[in-house]
Image (cartoon, helix red, strand yellow):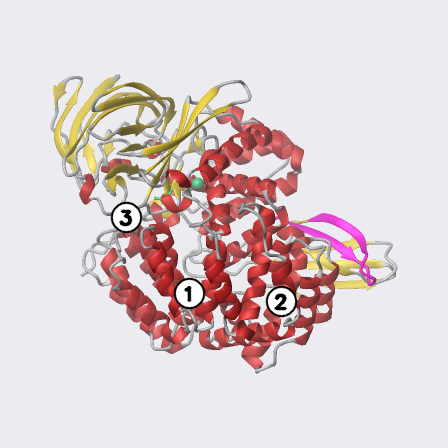
Amino acid sequence: MRDAAPQTIYLKDYTPFGYLIDGVELTFRLHPTATRVISRIRFRPNPDATDHRFFLHGEGLTLISAAIDGQTVTPDRTDTGLTCPVPDAPFVWEAEVEISPSTNTALEGLYMSNGMYCTQCEAEGFRNITYYPDRPDVMAPFSVRIEGDEKILLSNGNPGNSGTGFAEWHDPWPKPAYLFALVAGDLVNHPDTFTTRSGKKVELNIWVRPGDEGKCAFGMQALRDSMTWDEEVYGREYDLDIFNIVAVDDFNMGAMENKGLNIFNSSAVLASPETSTDTNFERIEAIIAHEYFHNWTGNRITCRDWFQLCLKEGLTVYRDSQFTSDMRSAPVKRISDVIALRARQFREDNGPLAHPVRPDSFVEINNFYTATVYEKGAELIGILKTLVGDNAYAKALDLYFNRHDGEACTIEDWLQAFEDATGRDLSQFKRWYEQAGTPRLSVADDFKDGTYTLNFEQKTPATPGQDIKDARVIPIAVGLIGPNGDEVHETTVLEMTGARQSFRFDGLSAKPIPSILRGFSAPVILEREITNAERAFLLAHDTDPFNKWEAGLSLARDGLIAMIHDGAAPDSAYLDAVQTMARDDSLDPAFRALALGLPSQDDLAQALYDQGHTPDPQAIWEALETLRHAKAQAMQDLAPRLYAQYQVTGPYQPNAEQSGARSLANAALAMITRLDGGAQAQRQYDNASNMTQQLAAWSCLLQAGKGEAATAAFYDQWQHDRLVIDKWFMLQILNADPAKTADTAARLTKHPDFTMKNPNRFRSTLGGLTASSAGFHHASGKGYELLANWLIRLDPLNPQTTARMCSAFETWKRYDSDRQVHIKAQLERILDTPSLSRDTTEMVTRILA
Ligand code: ARG
Ligand code: ZN
């Protein structure tokens, strides 16, 4: 019972809209089930367009009336919009529609969350609000009047008149409909002000439900820091009298950069030491910055069409990571970003969902808010900056902002600004945007008569729809270290443009140990012949923190692969080297905590698969357990020393220094727990005064099988706090024995606090299942079945979240035939569900292809 195949949209088919808009006036008469939206839109023919068909998007709208230049019209309507004859001259379109926010469970368009009205319009949600050309290249100034009984009535731009039961807003900056926002509710604010460097005073607010006022101060400081940073680093000032942020409990994504009215998933803005971990604080700071930075990279300059999504997202992720590096530790941020990139983007790039950073076709654009568009998109900005240099990057950005302010742009516009600013030909660089797949960069070396040569070769495996890959330009940052541990050649960037290329270093007295791809200078998979002794040497001597960490990680990975595949014992070279590293008090504790980490189960599965083996998720999990145990034993003296040494005294602060100390102490606690059975963890749990300490201790107890009392106590303590209870759901699943993961998740879906209507709760539970690799891939197939059951249930309510979670199945071809049979059966069961959404249909079809 599959519906007709949904329509594929192609980049090559882009044509401009036939009309320009001089102004939009909207009136909202709010009502939970019968909100009226009255629109008055001034259109005029677009002189640059050849196609003057008048089509307005609109979905799920009840049309009450429509008129052109005051004359009632009866448009031709379909499921996706309407059309009608219009004058060949400027005209005014007026319409009134009715919508039902309280029954909108998809959380796109205007919906209700805990009694409050809010919107999410990116990418194509505005068409659920009224009839409109809902495409990013149609930009207009908006005036909005909201009529409702709620205390607070907000929209984009600057406030206008307001009184009992109404408020008016005017946004002078032309914007596409996806940046429209409206919020109405009995909210309270955490206010502040900011004066821009040209002396403009801006009112700032974070709006929350009563009771959450105490969790706004950190987000507000992050906002102020972001505003200052964008002035100092990119020369960009804020451009309205007011900047509002609203926290919403039911939200599909992290947050949204609507002009002057950012809407946030409450998990991405509310913070307090008692309820948020250090990781939460850092994420909140980054997301506030990300959305704020969109004001220039996204709003002032937006995307011509959704194929160009990386134009705003890649650049804005790059900017927020620069911000975090400046606010905190740059090496720690880089290592964390690469861990996430490999876990999500490399995984995507090496499976059936691989797509270019700028895709050339899609069925449902919501399925392309991916790690490839965002995180790989950000890596491409980093490559470009490395290739042209910091000064030229700044010059090109200024040109881009000056040239395109107020426009809807393409990747071609972006690259043109760089070509014009630098005189450089970027046609080869552009392949990074067009070709999917992660390049494999292999390297062999050679030393003769004082000359050291590195011979590189690049190859990118085929991806869906792209068999042949051309060589890309790859900046390879390299340093050389002499046999005594001194750096004999400082970091230099080799620019590889060919499929094969060699680089020489002269005048060396002995064969050096190379440190290749320093700082992870390009998103590639480096394949090199290297001995464990050389890796241990790099872990000890590399001056590049990223490669120092990478040396330890690869040592661990190879040891684990030998354990899994050949039944080897834990590698003593790794245990010795990592212990020496951990002992070194001159190293940042946060770095040491990262370097004590092991590759994820999923990384190991991919590594085994790449080496021609079929990964066994249970064997991977067991090897990790064995190695963790061996590490705890090897460090039985060191771990308690580190634990004591890095206890933070004094009031909690979510800064890099304190959180680094806590992360190292908690890494030590995990080792201690393996030997003391949980005594120390219980003490930490009982005395914890912040969520970082409480959660780390509870995780240790769960892993030790001693978590029962803490699990009950944690629930009693936090049952009133949704965001903390999300953690309560997730951690029980993440820390379950793989044989029990699916049963734990299934049991929790029956808990009275479980609801599939809240994306955060759904993701904590079913996302906990999919993140527990061995548990999800349990040989019985029960993990797959449980996920499929819930995806089938969620799809009619919330297609967007359902579709995103299908990616849990994207690695299915790695596994043995029994598992493949189980997964395929579940995917087909999903696909055979009557009226399956376009979102989920596209995802499952691509995964199965
Ligand atoms: N632009 C938002 C951000 O990156 C994300 C919006 C995602 N929306 C969606 N429907 N996929 O901050
Ligand atoms: Zn974004």
Query: Magenta segment, principal secondary structure?
Result: strand
Measuring from the top left, give residue 362's x and y in whole percent: 35, 48
Q: Is mark 1 within 8 Å of ligand 1?
A: no
Closer to the chain start, of discs 2 and 3, is: 3
Q: Quadrant of ligand 1?
A: top left
Highlighted range, magenta: 470-494
Q: Nearer the viewer, mark 3 or mark 1?
A: 1
Q: Nearer the viewer, mark 2 or mark 1?
A: 2
CB under 8 Å between callouts 3 and 1?
Answer: no
Q: Identify the residue position indicated by label 3 in the image.
A: 7
> Quadrant of the image for the N terminus?
bottom left
Closer to the chain start, of discs 3 and 1, is: 3
Q: Identify the residue position indicated by label 2 in the image.
A: 639
Closer to the chain start, of discs 2 and 1, is: 2
> Is label 3 in a helix, a strand or a loop?
loop
Amino acid type, callout 3: Gln
